[in-house]
Image: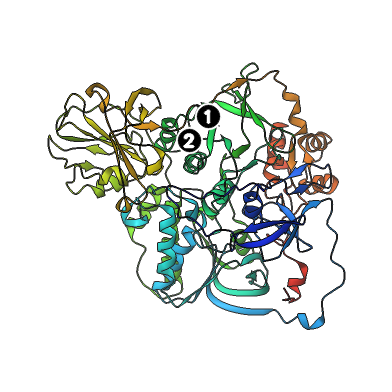
């Protein structure tokens, strides 16, 4: 079988070799310890996990977060979500072909036991940046707290982030990589004895008796009765409707990062990204680090909504960025083979004749997030004392989740009477700043100093970030102390900079270069930060140098590569260039620009064929026909066509159904929303009866 494992990565440490044997359709495969079935199958070159019983459509991984059901397989005769269940030695895995046959026989009576009910002062659902930060504050105050997380590793999306974080050095560890922040937070949390941690444990529902059902370690069902519930459950990715949107290879950007960065599995050879927010831009950069070609990125707005420095990093590597473009279709039979995009007008309608067909084997959907807030909402409905933090409260960056988690932790401590301290004003202000969207842009202007060593700051957009000003021991880079969104400025005089590289290496956006005029003022030495490892380029190799927008300034030989453990994954490429372009150089192209071929004809009629409900394979046309017949109650629509009745409980389709209502100009005032099922996460019914047998 094909080996899709990533054995070398410029930032991430290698994982142990796969030694656990399991079987896919009676074929021997090998997995790493604690590896999910989905990742193990993809690592072995298996991308098709089954076919839908309704129409035979191929199924594969989509969310990698347990939020949908596209990755269902049969593991040891039980249907499971392959993205959430780990491989066991000797496990027999088969594809989901048609409806699964239920296991024969029952369970012995001695396998059942009474359901345990435990009490705690605070239950935190979610061990990501917000949950960990809140738990640390509770631990500092000696509060009895329980953190429940459905993954084997704490940190949430932090464990997927190989880049250095933006934000405040003082409050949220800005300038440190997300993977390192996760380890720091978990390390601090485990030092507090009053806080218990349940990993690989799923909170499934909130009940009217003010208890929360938790499946601990995938085996024992327990009811937890907290005095206070804190929901830090994060966000789920929004879906899109287009032809081929359920083909294997179409996935959320977060799913891609999970498989690639957490599991070091190469899920794609050449991908295309839909969405120019931070999630899409960062996923593209992570793909390049993993040796995956990025064929392009399409954003419907006139400019990308994420940080400009993230966008510039992709542009500097020659990734085509198509603003004012949307996706028309993902094309292929069993897997994605290409994507069709088109330019849009000011009303976001595709313009006929502007179609482009681009070869790729994966399409990443990064069109926004929505809070996973059902636990918070239901707890409030039942009168529980409940709080929310991070994306479960408001979608923002992980840095904002950390500070809001700290704030909620202190608020809960005050509520329980363990502290009389007020939440620090600077925390509240920092939270407001870290939640803010990217601000104004300025035009990049070359500096006037052309002697000694000059740091050139290519960051030209207001974003919350201050590591560069904190790293400069000479205090030559200025950012307003009261608002770290100010664009940084070099305020040093001639000869003030010592060329220590700290600002260059520590900038999260890789947006600083150093120009050294000391040895050769006509052809100064430019130092460029690089996060692709020493082997990505060699001394003497001719490379294309680019400015911030990706425009090639010329080709020049590499003078040398600097790096080492002290730089923590960042290398410095040095090259001599003419003085006239020295301060314009912002990056180096290591990957060539992708080719694009035209595609015709344009056919918008396929929209009715687009799948809205992935679980039950219900199309947009079926939904639209029912709306035109006069149905405005989503529950009635559900009963007729089964949209929303699948394993995910409407997590991906209900928002899309609402979009069709808007397209049909149906007022929201007359729409009856779908009744939410009692359980937010599905588990075997036997667990509710206290069954514990493996």
In this rendering, position of residue 364 left or right of residue 314? right
Q: For residue 305, which numbered disc appears in the image?
A: 2
Residue 243: % across, % down: 71, 32
Question: Which residue is located at x 33 percent, y 29 percent?
Answer: 442
Structural distance between the alpha carbons of marks 1 and 2: 8 Å
Residue 122: % across, % down: 52, 72
Q: Residues within 10 Å of mark 1 (few under 14, many from 20)?
A: some
Observer-nearest of 489 and 418: 489
State the scheme by which the image is colored. rainbow
Observer-nearest of 428 and 50: 50
Q: Is residue 484 visible?
A: no
In this rendering, position of residue 126 left or right of residue 434? right
Decide: marks 1, 2 in contact (CB < 8 A)?
yes
Total marks drawn? 2
Quadrant in which the C terminus appears: bottom right
Q: How crowded is mark 2: few (under 14 residues within 10 Å), some or many (20 or more)?
A: some
Question: Which residue is located at x 78 percent, y 35 percent?
Answer: 624
State the SS at label 1: loop
State the SS at label 2: loop
Indicate whether 440 appears above or below 472. above
In this rendering, position of residue 678 left or right of residue 392? right
* Residue found at the far right of this picture: 104
Observer-nearest of 63 and 333: 333
Indicate whether 172 appears above or below 666. below
Q: For residue 301, which numbered disc appears in the image?
A: 1
In this rendering, position of residue 57 left or right of residue 335? right
Q: Is residue 125 visible?
A: yes
Residue 619: % across, % down: 78, 38
Residue 500: % across, % down: 21, 45
* Residue found at the far bottom of this picture: 110
Q: For residue 82, which numbered disc appears in the image?
A: none
Indicate whether 48 appears above or below 450. below
């Amino acid at each position: 079988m094909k080996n899709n494992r990533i054995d070398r990565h410029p930032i991430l440490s290698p994982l142990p070799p796969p030694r656990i044997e399991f079987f896919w359709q009676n074929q021997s495969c090998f997995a790493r310890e604690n590896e999910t079935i989905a990742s193990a199958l993809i690592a072995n070159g298996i991308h098709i996990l089954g076919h839908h019983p309704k129409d035979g459509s191929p199924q594969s991984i989509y969310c990698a977060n347990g939020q949908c059901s596209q990755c269902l397989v049969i593991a040891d005769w039980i249907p499971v979500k392959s993205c959430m269940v780990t491989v066991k030695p000797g496990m027999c895995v088969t594809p989901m072909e048609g409806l699964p046959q239920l296991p024969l026989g029952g369970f012995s009576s001695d396998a059942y036991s009474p359901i345990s009910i435990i009490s705690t002062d605070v239950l935190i659902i979610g061990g990501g940046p917000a949950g960990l930060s809140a738990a640390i504050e509770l631990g500092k105050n000696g509060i009895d707290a329980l953190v429940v997380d459905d993954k084997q590793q704490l940190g949430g999306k932090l464990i997927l982030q190989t880049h250095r974080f933006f934000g405040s050095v003082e409050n949220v560890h800005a300038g440190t990589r997300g993977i390192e922040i996760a380890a720091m937070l978990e390390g601090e949390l485990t030092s507090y004895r009053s806080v218990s941690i349940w990993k690989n444990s799923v909170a499934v529902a909130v009940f009217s008796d003010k208890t929360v059902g938790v499946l601990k370690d995938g085996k024992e069902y327990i009811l937890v009765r907290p005095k206070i519930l804190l929901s830090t459950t994060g966000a789920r990715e929004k879906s899109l409707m287009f032809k081929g949107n359920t083909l294997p290879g179409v996935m959320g950007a977060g799913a891609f990062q999970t498989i690639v960065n957490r599991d070091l599995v190469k899920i794609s050879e050449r991908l295309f990204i839909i969405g120019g927010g931070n999630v899409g831009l960062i996923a593209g950069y992570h793909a390049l680090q993993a040796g995956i070609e990025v064929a392009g990125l399409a954003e419907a707005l006139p400019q990308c909504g994420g940080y400009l420095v993230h966008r510039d990093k992709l542009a500097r590597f020659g990734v085509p960025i198509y603003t004012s473009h949307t996706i028309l279709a993902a094309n292929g039979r069993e897997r994605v083979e290409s994507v069709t995009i088109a330019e849009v007008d000011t009303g976001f309608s595709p313009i006929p004749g502007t179609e482009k067909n681009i070869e790729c084997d994966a399409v990443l959907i990064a069109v926004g997030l929505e809070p996973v807030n059902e636990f918070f909402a239901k707890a409030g409905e039942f009168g529980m004392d409940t709080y929310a933090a991070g994306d479960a409260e408001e979608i923002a960056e992980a840095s904002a989740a950390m500070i809001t988690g700290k704030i909620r932790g202190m608020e809960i401590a005050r509520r329980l009477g363990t502290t009389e301290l007020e939440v620090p004003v600077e925390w509240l202000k920092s939270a407001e700043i870290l939640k803010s969207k990217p601000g104004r842009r300025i035009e990049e202007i070359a500096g006037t100093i052309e002697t000694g060593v000059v740091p050139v700051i290519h960051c030209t957009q207001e974003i919350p970030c201050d590591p560069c000003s904190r790293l400069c021991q000479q205090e030559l880079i200025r950012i307003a102390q009261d608002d770290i969104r100010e664009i940084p400025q070099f305020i040093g005089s001639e000869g003030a900079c010592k060329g220590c590289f700290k600002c260059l290496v520590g900038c999260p956006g890789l947006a600083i270069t150093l120009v050294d005029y000391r040895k050769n003022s006509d052809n100064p030495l430019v130092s460029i930060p690089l996060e692709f490892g020493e082997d990505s380029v060699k001394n003497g190799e001719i490379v294309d140098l680019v400015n911030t927008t990706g425009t090639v300034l010329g080709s020049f030989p590499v003078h040398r590569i600097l790096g080492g453990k002290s730089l923590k994954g960042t290398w410095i490429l040095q090259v001599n260039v003419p003085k006239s372009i020295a301060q314009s150089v912002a990056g180096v192209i290591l990957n060539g620009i992708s080719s694009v071929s035209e595609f015709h004809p344009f056919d918008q009629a396929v929209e009715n064929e687009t799948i809205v409900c992935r679980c039950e394979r219900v199309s947009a046309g079926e939904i639209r026909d029912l709306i035109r017949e006069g149905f405005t109650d989503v529950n009635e629509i559900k009963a007729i066509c089964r949209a929303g009745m699948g394993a995910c409980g409407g997590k991906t389709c209900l928002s899309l159904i609402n979009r069709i209502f808007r397209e049909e100009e149906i007022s929201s005032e007359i729409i009856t929303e779908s009744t939410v099922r009692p359980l937010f996460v599905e588990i075997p019914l036997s667990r509710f009866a206290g069954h514990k047998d493996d």
